[in-house]
Amino acid sequence: MAMLEDEFRHFLSNTSCHSLVKVSYQYRCMLAQKLEDCRHIITYFNYFEMMYCMLRIRDKTTELCVMLLLFVAALFYVLLMSIVVDTFLTPVLKVLSLKMRMNEYLAGVTILAFANSSPDLIANLMPIKENAALFTSIISNAVAILLLSGGMICYLKPFKMDGHSTAQNLLFLLLSVELLRFIMVKGDSVTETESIMLLSVYVAYLVVNVADLILMRYSIRKLRVEIRTLRAQRTSQRNSRELKQKIALLLRLEHNEAMNFKKRNSHYYVKKGRNPSNSLADIFATPLSEQKPDQVDYETNRTMLHSESNAKNRFLGAEFLETLNPFDAVEWKLSGCFGRLMIVMKMPLVLLITMFVPVVDYERYKHGWSKLLNCTQIVTNPFILITAVHSKFASVYKSWYVDLNLNYSKWSFCLTVPLALFVFLHARTDVPPSYHLLFITLSVSSSLVIIVLCVNEIEVLTFIVGSVLHLSEDFMDITFGSMMNATIDLMSNFALAMQGYERMAFAASCAGPFFSIALGLGVALLFNTNVRRKGSSYWLYGEEGDNCYIFLLLAIVAQLWLCLTFNFVARRSTGIFSWTLFALFLLYAFVAEWDLVHDFTRDTFFEPQ
């Protein structure tokens, strides 16, 4: 009797939010407000309370209509992320790569991989993930990124890979997967030592990639000396042959040694001598690279409008309004019906984000500098970011939405207002100041906060849709969840590939999953105390863990096999093969969820007591 009373006493604290959709509609509002687990997993909006208290859903038809609205909300978050990635984050990543003297491969496996995978790292530390099947989630995300993003780059921009860098990335990814699975299956829990071991693999990966670039630059300097020596010697057939070989090697190394700025929308591939009516050939045939992207003289872009005779605040107001204008007349004229619809949908979001997120883009005139707007962003950007982050951690809700907490953010004005006044009095309108590069801090931080916000909201929406449709949490993670999480990689890698940075994008497609496994999951396992409990390895691994593991192995081995077969030339057939393999992964997940086939996971067997 005492045990029964104790069970009822702790009923609300022990009941999962999944159970909410299993009771009658009339009780769901009360449970949405009182269940601790529902409060635990929400972010900025309590969708359950919105559905069953504010909208008062009382039948299945209305509930399904609301699910459709939540799907539209998820698309809204995806659209918001695409704007942030294309307009604000991607240009900053290129600037950072240039300033840090990285080549495309090192920039792809470090800066771009970090930017793409940092939302996963933060999401793994959120309360909703404390008792989640992290192995299943991370490995399914890796499958989606490697096959969808990598396949997209190979299809859109076939190119010649750097063989040893590509093989190195794939083999490190294979090492991290095998180490993670060994940690999961060798015992009942995960220790701190094992988490640190996983993190150390990422440290070794960074050391290898940095050392690789240093050795490449040393080889270039050595080859230049040898070429000068050979040219000074007497001409002979042997010297000519050796000189030709060294020059060819030097040109290949110099091609991968540095990163250059390339113009947006430059037509990288030109099709010649192909029948325009042969649409099947256009889909499957790999085009030849005949036109290189134009280089950007970013120093000229910075100073081309500058003149000492100009007034310091010339066109101050006109420049402010022009920068805020979200309508691009040229893009509108060149777009079709669907493109114009997307422009109309994006305009309010572009205007809203532009008001507080600064642009640092070396491809733009004055590198995106707008004196009056940037001065206001010095004030508004920290205020909005601190408010958003603090409100999330305070988690005080007014009905179904979070209460904005200004206790900390209001003090930011003490620093930002004087700083904005200094910049306004010091800077000019016709040229960015020398400290314009510092605006990267505001741009990167605000971009990542917006992306993390969108990813977390999509995570919650996926959980709600799966609960209402009575789909398992693991199934939602490896299907819709993995595709949603791969969206940020797809958008940033697509934007870079179309500008001629396909090597950087493909390197990030391989390094992003490795970052999520080695660093993202390593940090989560290190700080999550629940994984120290006996039996935690079972729920960490998840019911779909073996399925995801086997398909990721197939993806890695297939990528290595195709690279070796085609002599590390990315072809369209590689992209089509990758998409086909991911389609099979989804198909298997669906038929296993519907119990049409048995998944790869072994049935749980308990020894009789």
Image: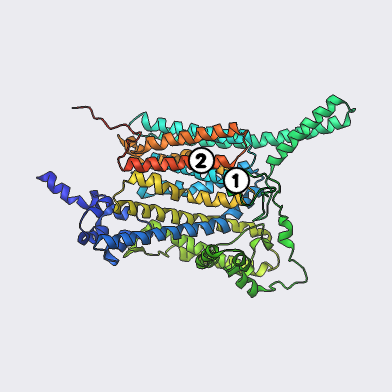
Q: Quadrant of the N terminus?
A: top left
**Residue drawn at the location 68% of the way across and 62% of the way down:** 366
Report the number of numbered marks.
Answer: 2
Left or right placement of residue 71 versus residue 362 in this view: left
Q: Is residue 277 left or right of residue 466?
A: right
Q: Is residue 107 visible?
A: no
Q: Is residue 186 left or right of residue 500?
A: left
Contact, mark 1 vs mark 2 (Cβ under 8 Å) = no
Q: Nearer the viewer, residue 252 or 280?
A: 280
How has the structure been colored for display?
rainbow
**Structural distance between the alpha carbons of marks 1 and 2:** 19 Å
Q: Nearest the camera: 162 or 194?
A: 162
Q: Is residue 596 visible?
A: yes
Q: Amino acid at mark 2?
A: Ser
The disc label shown at residue 281, or none: 1
Q: Name the disc covering residue 578, or none.
A: 2
Q: Residue furthest toward the right?
A: 234
